[in-house]
Image: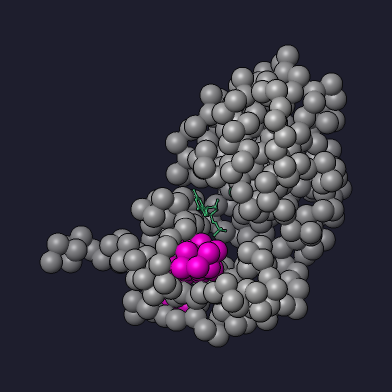
Amino acid sequence: MISLDHILDKAKRVGICGHVKPDGDAYGSCMGLYLFLKTYYPSIDAKVYLEDRYPDSFRFVSCSQDVIHDYPIEEPHDVFFALDCSDLERLGSSGAYFQAAKNTVVIDHHVSNDGFGMICEIQPEASSASELVALMIGRERITRQIAEPLYMGIAHDTGVFQYSCTSSRTMMVGGWLMDTGIDFSRICDETFFLKTYIQNQVLGRALAESILMMDGKLIFSAIRQKDMEFYQIEPKDLDGIVQQLRVTRGVEVAVFLYEVQTRRYKVSMRSNGKVDVSKVALYFQGGGHVRAAGCTINGGVHDVVNNIAAQVEKQLLPSSQMSR
Ligand code: 5GP
Ligand code: MN
């Protein structure tokens, strides 16, 4: 595993960023690393850059107000970290800082990551980028402040220590974090389980309007821009819908779409194991993990779903049937 101390030796200006539309792990890993720098490397000028706003529920994390959302022209950073990002494009506006930096570090757990940094720690078997950051910092140096965002990140990417990406190492790291005295049940409730009334209404609607295809092996639902305007919701309010679709008995793949521009859909996919949805996402220039992946596709709902279904079917059909 790469050594943070080695990387930070002699660095004066350090930048940290996660992927666009930061989720719990992107935010948690960035803030965990940032709070580590503030605590143990106070002379380093460290900054966290996240182009998009994060959910309000993440604000309990110490120093959340320090996150920078705009991109002034700055001197190149000595070291720039990209966390939980599978490719340069997913960095959004932070990509320019990343490319200009003297030293670049990629810490990630996406199978689709091809190692776009000068120094890379990519472990597809890790539950989360937050797990990797915790391991790099090491048990002795993890304070309660540092533990809070890292626990959130791990909890989110593992569905609260439940998805198959959860390993005994994940549980061990979770234990280290717990031992700092964090209020772990509150973190999970406040940032993962609790939904607003509107979010629950939209979830209910998405479930009610969901459609089964491929003999019940694929389920999909979609939300259009006009519905999002009606409910006055943003993409981050849609978290959890695809997970709920996935736990439909008999389903292999759940697909949830939301319209980002007219006839342009952001696609979230979840698999119950038989289908590698990162392959499907990659086919449409997206990425992710075997059981959770995403991409963006142009077209109407039915075109998008049919195109995805064709790729899913390729994986579900035995090869002998494919050639017919
Ligand atoms: P979600 O469905 O929660 O948005 O994303 C599931 C997983 O797929 C996450 O790990 C996320 O980073 C990845 N992912 C989602 N959308 C994209 C995309 O457009 N490009 C890439 N490379 N990865 C994505
Ligand atoms: Mn992640």
Q: Is residue 258 magenta?
A: yes
Q: Is residue 39 visible?
A: yes
Residue at 83% in and 31% down: 38
- Quadrant into which the C terminus falls: bottom left
Q: Position of residue 67 (x, y in %)?
A: 78, 43
Q: Is residue 5 visible?
A: no
Q: Which residues are magenta?
A: 249-270
| Furthest residue in direction left, as rendered | 324
Vertical position of residue 174 compared to residue 95: above or below: below
Q: Quadrant of residue 143?
A: top right
> Relative to the observer, which residue lies in front, 178 or 25?
25
Q: Position of residue 185 (x, y in %)?
A: 80, 60
Q: Quadrant of residue 15?
A: top right
Residue at 41% in and 50% down: 285
Give the overall secondary structure of the magenta segment.
Answer: strand
Give the left or right position of residue 202, taking residue 68 as reference.
left
Residue at 63% in and 53% down: 21
> Relative to the observer, which residue lies in front, 70 or 222?
70
> Relative to the observer, which residue lies in front, 137 or 72?
72
Identify the image's colour scheme: rainbow, by chain, secondary structure or one colour: one colour
Q: Position of residue 138 (x, y in %)?
A: 72, 32
Give the left or right position of residue 189, taking residue 169 as reference.
right
- Quadrant into which the N terminus falls: top right
Count numbered badges in the picture.
0
| Furthest residue in direction top, as rendered | 10
Q: Is residue 207 magenta?
A: no
Vertical position of residue 248 compared to residue 277: above or below: below
Residue at 80% in and 26% down: 45
